[in-house]
Amino acid sequence: MRICKICGVNKPLTEYKRVGPNRVHMWNCLSCYKENRKYNKRNMLSKMDADLRRRYNITEENYYEMLEAQNYKCATCKSTDPIGYRGSDKFCVDHDHNTGKVRGLLCNHCNRALGLVRENRQTLQNMLQYLDI
């Protein structure tokens, strides 16, 4: 059983498409996946907009509104350079992995740093104390 990331319904794994080399189940059920594909084709969404909607449930317009609210800077280090991963010139969308709630936009370095400490506040506090030694 898995809860669909889009509709929020707990469904059996047979309701999910298997993808990738390891044949893992997608996070959205087949019916939501198909509806999302129809919507994208029907509305001719940009690749970025379709990706943001699928992964974070926000639009490209929401992304640029957040970026403007952050003065076109990383939310943590205030860098204006996203230092994109694999040549990307976009900031990373930071989100809570438990709730899926979007927190802000980060440069690649800050996004990876949060991921490497597993978003653990105590680990970050320990690292700050360590730096003060």
Image: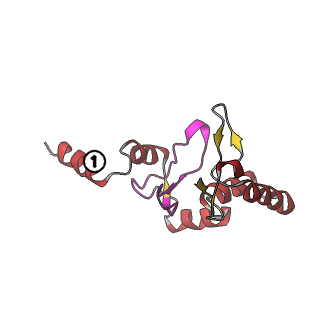
Residue furthest to the left:
133
Q: Main secondary structure of the magenta part?
A: loop
Confirm whether the magenta stretch covers residue 76: yes
Number of numbered discs on residues: 1
Q: Which residue is nearer to you in this view: 27 or 11?
A: 11
For the point 33% across and 51% down, the residue is 120
Looking at the image, residue 76 sits to the left or right of residue 61; the answer is left
Q: Which residue is mark 1?
A: 123
Q: Which residue is nearer to you in this view: 18 or 123?
A: 18
For the point 66% across and 54% down, the residue is 28
**Label 1: element kind:** helix
Residue furthest to the right:
42
Give residue 31's quadrant in the image: bottom right
Where residue 111 sits: x, y (%)? 46, 48
For the point 81% across and 62% down, the residue is 39
Q: Which residue is nearer to you in this view: 95 or 47?
A: 95
Confirm whether the magenta stretch covers residue 85: yes
The residue carrying pointer 1 sits among few (fewer than 14), some (14 to 19) or many (20 or more) residues within 10 Å by Cα, namely few
For the point 63% across and 32% down, the residue is 22
Q: Label 1 amino acid? A: Thr
Where residue 56 sits: x, y (%)? 60, 59
Q: State the colouring used for the structure image.
A: secondary structure
Q: Quadrant of the C terminus?
A: top left
Question: In the rendered structure, which segment of residues is drawn in magenta?
Answer: 75-104
Q: State whether residue 18 is above or below residue 77.
A: above
Q: Which residue is nearer to you in this view: 6 or 56?
A: 6
Q: State whether residue 46 is above or below residue 112.
A: below
Looking at the image, residue 36 sits to the left or right of residue 51; the answer is right
Where residue 93 sits: x, y (%)? 54, 55
Where residue 53 sits: x, y (%)? 67, 60
